[in-house]
Each structure stands twice: as structure tokens, then as C-alpha cells.
Amino acid sequence: MSLLSVDDLVVEHRSPGRPAVRAVAGASLTVSAGEVVGLVGESGCGKSTLARAVCGLNPVTAGSITFDGQPVTPLGLRRRRLTGIQMVFQDPYASLNPRRLVGDQVADGLRTARDTVTSPADLLERVGLPREFAGRHPHEFSGGQRQRIAIARALAARPRLLIGDEPISALDASAQSQVARLMRDLAVDAGAGLLFISHDLSVVRLIADRIAVMYLGRIVEVGDTAEVWADPRHPYTKALLRAIPKPDGMGVLPAELPGDVPDPVNPPQGCRFHPRCPHVMDVCRGKEPDFGPVACWLHEPR
């Protein structure tokens, strides 16, 4: 049984006097213990909304989320009983309390896990920071160091599922792969699952066992990382891979995906990708593919 199971999830954002925005429109996803799943796609496709729903930060409109066999319910005013899921957010400075010492913030997770043996300095050391950093405030660190502190705080609670919501996008290029590999190594060593969300496929390729590709609220392709990279099947996945810059010194610009992501308030009928797809057929305009692992009429199961 999967550690995390997201089944036909729908999440809508509602504002008074405005139509509902269906940010997640029937997405399904699984993560097993000790597995790293990379969730990729363009900005605005619903990746972060899905992650926040898994953590209980966004209410679910339809579908279900189960963690370790138990349903995940939205957070309320009462203290949450489910502490097996922890998230590392995109902006490490915004997710840390600027008035508290980082050691005290890491200690919050240790108290949650009832760990009286491990010290905050021990966890900072595990993420590659000196032990004495526990006595400093967040503003005294670089972005990469703050993200390592955020990872240490998340790990302190001994989660069984760690979620990285674009955790490297605010970092410089030299720190991105280091932080991504660190999250993978620490999660796998602890036997936890890792859902790593990013728009950078080249980094996801380095750490993920499986890749899930998301477009306009739906998962359009899922597969082993090596297989998806070597033989992408959905036209959108192919376009994402062609858009990755190649450091070959040839000076050739990556291929640009034509068009823009449609408005989720009024998504296209049929396949959501068909207005941008070079292989569009009549069936694509009229009926949405509701099968997997590749949601494309070119790969309809026989």
C-alpha cells in the first residue's frame, strides 16, 4: 500500500463575486515509503495547490487524500493530530520566524516527535551546517543556509512524508542541486517518502525515482524517471524536455513551448493541452482523456 494516495483530487479557489478557479482538476498520485516522486510542470499548473491540500492547508472540493491509510483532513483551529507530513516551502525566510533563534525553531519539531535525545545542533549538523548556528537568527544566513535550516526543522518532527514545494527556486544555481540532493538523501535514509515539486526537470532528474507531469490541474504522464527522460510520451512532456537549456557551447536556444497556459477559470474542452499541441486530433477537442499513465489520445489503451 502506498504511503500517500491522492485519488481524483479537485481543489477550487473561491472569491466572492468571482467564478471558482479549479486549480486541481482530478489529479491522482501516489508516493511510497522511501520513494522520491518529482512533480513537475509550468508555473500555475496546480503543483503547489496539490501539495498544500496534501498537508491540509487547502480544503478539498472533491476526491480524496489518504496518508498511511488515514484520510487527510483540512487544518482547523485545533492542534493537528497528524504530524507525519512536513513541508519545506519555497521561501525559507518567510517560513522561519525572524525573532526566534533557529535552534529554538528546530526544537519545536523535536518536541512534536517527543525526541529528548537529539539536539537542534545535531540536526543542523546533519544538513551540513555548523552546530553553533543554533544560536543565531534567520537573517544572519544566506538563502541556501536558511533552506537547510527549514529542512532540519521539518526533519525534527520525524515525518514519514516530506514535501518540498519549489524548495530550490529561490536559491542560486550553485545551491539548487546541493539542497535537492540533501532532501533526497535525508528522506531516503529515514525511510520517508519525498514529494519534490519543481519546474526544473534537470534537477528532478537527479533525485527522483518517478516523475509526474502536471498540466492545468491534471497529471498527464507518470513514469520512472529514466524512462520518461529517455522516451517521453505525452506531447507536453516532450515540450518540457525540449525547453531545457543544453550546456553544449553551441549557443542554440532551447525550444519554446508555443502559446500560454489557458485560464483555469475557463479551461479548454476536451484535452486541456490541445490548443498548444502539434498532434491535435478531432477527438482531442471534444473529449478529455481520463486514462493513464499517459493521458493522451495518441496513447489510448487498447
Image (tube, helix red, strand yellow):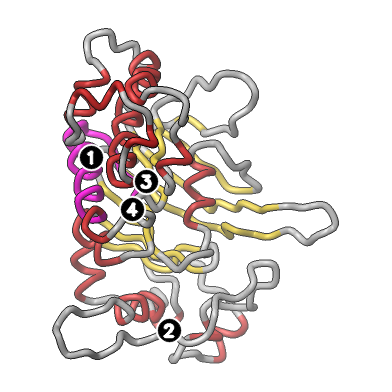
> Which badge, 1 or 2, is on the more N-terminal residue?
1
Residue to which mark 2 is pinned: 257
Q: Residues within 10 Å of mark 1 (few under 14, many from 20)?
A: some
Give the residue type at disc 3.
Gly
**Which residue is at a point 51% across and 44% down the rendered structure image?**
52
Q: Tag 4, which secondary structure?
A: loop
Give the residue type at disc 1.
Gly
Residue to which mark 3 is pinned: 164
Instruction: Single out the mark in the foreground, 3 or 4.
Output: 4
> Which badge, 3 or 2, is on the more N-terminal residue?
3
Q: Which residues are magenta?
A: 176-196
Q: Residues within 10 Å of mark 3 (few under 14, many from 20)?
A: many
Residue to which mark 4 is pinned: 168
Give the residue type at disc 2.
Leu
The quadrant where residue 177 appears:
bottom left
Q: CA distance from mark 1 to mark 2?
A: 34 Å
Q: CA distance from mark 3 to mark 2?
A: 26 Å
Magenta-drawn stretch contains 164 = no
> Which badge, 4 or 1, is on the more N-terminal residue?
1
- Check residue 34 in the rendering and tell me which mark sits there, or answer none: 1
Q: Residues within 10 Å of mark 4 (few under 14, many from 20)?
A: many
Is the residue 262 above or below the residue 134 in the image?
A: below
Q: Quadrant of the N terminus?
A: top left
Q: Are marks 3 and 4 in contact (CB under 8 Å)?
A: yes
Instruction: Single out the mark in the foreground, 2 or 4.
Output: 4
> Which badge, 2 or 4, is on the more N-terminal residue?
4
Horizontally, residue 210 falls left or right of residue 189, namely right
Is the residue 23 above or below the residue 266 in the image?
A: above
**Which residue is more in the foreground, 224 or 93?**
93
